[in-house]
Image (spheres, grey):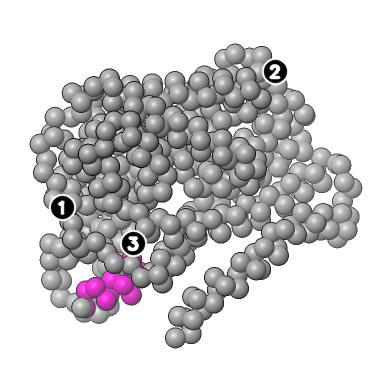
Amino acid sequence: MILKSSKWLLPIILPGIWILIYFNLQSGTNYLIDDIFRMQSGTRFAESFRFFIFEVPKVLMLLVLIIFVVGIIRSFFTAERTRKALEGRSLFAGNVMASMLGIVTPFCSCSAIPLFLGFVESGIPLGVTFSFLIAAPMINEVAVILLFGLFGWKVAAIYVGTGLVIAITAGWVIGKLKLENYVEPWVYEIRAGHAEGDEEKLQFSDRIQAGYTAVKEIVGKVWVYIILGIAVGAAAHGYVPENFMANLMGKSAWYSVPLSILIGVPLYSNAAGIIPIVSVLIEKGVPLGTALAFMMSVIGLSLPEMIILRKVLKLRLIVTFVGVVSLGIIIVGYIFNLIY
Amino acid sequence: MDIKILGPGCSKCKTLDKITREVVEKNGINATISKVEDIMEIIKYGVMSTPALVVDEKVVVKGRVPSSDEIKQILTK
C-alpha cells in the first residue's frame, strides 16, 4: 500500500523539487566555484570545471524528466499498432506517417528484422518501411534531449525537422527506385502469425510504471557516456583555443560536410557521448551544418544495424539506403552552413 | 507449462530469460523454458518487437521486459 501511494505521490512532489533545482543550477554552480572553492574565474581550469559542474546535473535532470514522459507516451504506441496505421497508405502519405511514427514507436535496432518482416508481410511498401527505419534511430529521445540541453530548443527543433525531412524523402526515393527485387527472396515467402486480439490492456498506473522503467533502462545505460562526453567537452571548453576548429572544419573548407559523415558513420557510439563533445566543437568554430551532419551520421547510420539488415536485404539495397541517406545529410549540412 | 522466450539475443532478451527462470525456480512452477532465437520462428508468433514471452504458444508479453512480480502473476494465473 505504501509503495502504491508513493508511486502516485512522487510524480506530484518531484516536479516541484526538479524545477527548483534546475532553474538554480547556474547560480548554484557559480556559488560553488567562486565562493566555496574560491577559484579564480577566467582561468582555464576554473572554466572547464564550471562547465562540467553545470552541464552534468543539467543534462541528467533533463534526461530523467523527459525520458519519464517519453516512456509514458511510448506506452501508447507499439510496433503492431504502427504497422496497422501504415497498412494501405499510399507512397508519400505513408512516408510522412512512417517517419513520424518512427519517433514515438519504441524501437531498438536488435528488433529491426522482426519489424521489417512484419511490415513487409502486411504489404507496407518498401519505401514506407525505410522511412520508419531511418527516422526511428535518427530522431532518438536521448539525442533530442541532449541537443535541447546543450544547444537550446532551436537546434533541437532543427534536428528533428531535418531528420523528418530526410526520413520522408529518402524513404520516398527508395520507394520510387523500385528495389523490391533486392530484398532477400525468402522474406516474401514467410507467413507471419498475427497476435492480434490479445493486445495488452494498460491501466494508467501501468503507464506511469512504463515511465519509471524507461528512466531506469535508458538513463541507467547512458549516464556514464554523458558524464564522459561532458568531461571531454569541458576540457576542450577550457583548454582548446577559440576558433581552433575553424580552419580544419570551418565553412571555407568545402570538404568538411562529407568528411564529417565519413568519420561519423563508423562511430556508431551512442549519441550520449558524442553530442556534448560536438557542442563544444561548435563553440570552437565548427559550423552548425557540419556539426549537424556529423551527429546525424553518427546516430542515424550505424554499422551494426546495416549488418543486421543484411540478413533481409541484398547488399545493393543497403548501399542504396546508405547512399540516399548520406546524400540527404550532406545536403542538410551544406544548407545550414549557408544559412548560418 | 511450456514457456518460450523470443528474442534474437539482445541484452533485454537475456534479461527476460534470466528473470523468467528465476521466477519459475523460486515458485516451484512446473514448466519447461526454452529460448527461441531464430527470427523465422519469432515472426511466426506475430511478434515484431522483442523480447517476447510465450506461454503455452500464446504471446503474453512483447517488446518489453516485465518485472518479476508481473511474470509471477502471469505464470501462476
Q: Amino acid at mark 2?
A: Asn
Residue A27 image-quadrant placement: bottom right
Quick one: A19 or A176, which is closer to the camera? A176
The reply to whether residue A276 is in sight is no
Quadrant of the frame with the N terminus of chain A: bottom left
Residue contact at pointers 1 and 3, CB within 8 angstroms: no
Measured from the top left, where is residue A84 in percent x and y?
25, 48
Q: Which residue is mark 2?
A: A247
Q: Are marks 3 and 2 on the same chain?
A: no
Quick one: A291 or A121, which is closer to the camera? A121
Q: Nearer the viewer, mark 1 or mark 2?
A: 1
Q: Amino acid at mark 1?
A: His
Label 1 secondary element: loop
Which residue appears at 37% of the width and 49% of the height?
A105
The magenta stretch spans residue B70: yes
Which residue appears at 53% of the width and 27% of the height?
A293
Task: Tell me how far mark 1 sits from mark 2, CA to CA.
Answer: 57 Å
Measured from the top left, where is residue A337 in percent x and y?
62, 22
Callout 1: 10 Å neighbours few (<14), some, many (20+)?
some
Which residue appears at 71% of the width and 48% of the height?
A52
Callout 3: 10 Å neighbours few (<14), some, many (20+)?
many
Q: Is residue A90 above or below residue A234?
A: above
- Identify the main secondary structure in magenta: helix
Badge number at residue B65:
3
Q: Which residues are magenta?
A: B65-76
The reply to whether residue A160 is in sight is yes
Badge number at residue A194:
1
